[in-house]
Amino acid sequence: MIAYSNIVAGILILLIGFIFHFVGQFISLINWEKAVKLGIAEKNILPEYRDYEYGIAMADLCIGWLYLIIGFGLILDQSWSFKLAWIPGVIFIYHSISFYFWSTKQEKRGYKYRSTSGKISWFLLNLVGGIVILLFAWAG
């Protein structure tokens, strides 16, 4: 096992899963305009994408509390958390790939969802974070 891998994986889950996904989406659902001002939600989202955005936000809220539990479990080196860490790892990988293709599809329709660097950054953060979490959880 890699030294402190549980702490690194736990922090990644708390940062990516709980802070970015759960808290960010919670703000979006409660107050879309506030989320736009914070840069969390898109200002000029097309109406046909609004339902998708709300669906993703609701999914992140439904699973987000698990990120908190699993993240702290890993930091505290609890054996059960290593068994559950595959959940956020797989979700982050899936989220990165689906976000990349979904935003690319929007761009082909003439709607620029995010800057290219923002799109790639979000894709890589979720992809690399998910892979690292899976590897560390597997090693633990």
Image (cartoon, rainbow, N blue to C red):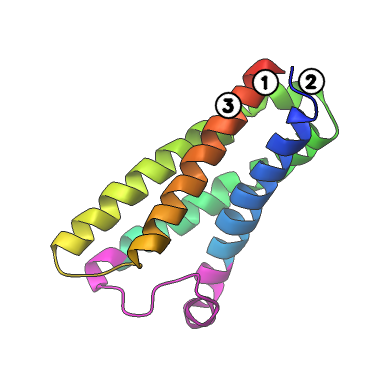
Q: Which mark is residue 134?
A: 3
Label 3 sits on what residue type? Leu
**Is residue 87 in view from this perspective?**
no
From the image, give the main secondary structure of the stretch colored magenta: helix
Q: Which of the two residues, 8 or 25, is positioned nearer the viewer here?
A: 8
Q: Could you say where residue 87 lies in the image, as x and y percent from the top left?
A: 56, 31
User: Which of the two discs, 3 and 2, sits closer to the camera?
Assistant: 3
Residue corresponding to mark 1:
83
x 58%, y 57%: residue: 20
* Residue at image location 67% in from the left, 17% down from the top: 139
Which span is picked out in magenta? 27-49
Quadrant of the image containing the N terminus: top right
Q: Is residue 11 left or right of residue 135?
A: right
Alpha carbon distance from label 2 to label 1: 7 Å
- Label 3 neighbour load within 10 Å: few <14, some 14-19, many 20+: many
Give how far across and how far down residue 91 sits, in percent: 49, 37
Residue 111 - label: none
Q: Which residue is mark 2?
A: 79
Is the residue under label 2 in contact with that under label 3 (CB below 8 Å)? no
Residue at 50% from the left image edge and 74% from the top image edge: 39
Q: Could you tell me which secondary element the residue under label 2 belongs to?
A: helix
Give, as a three-letter code, the residue at label 1: Lys
Q: Is residue 98 left or right of residue 47?
A: right
Q: Gap between marks 3 and 2, in whole Å?
A: 15 Å
The reply to whether the C-beta atoms of the residues labelled 1 and 3 are less than 8 Å apart is: no
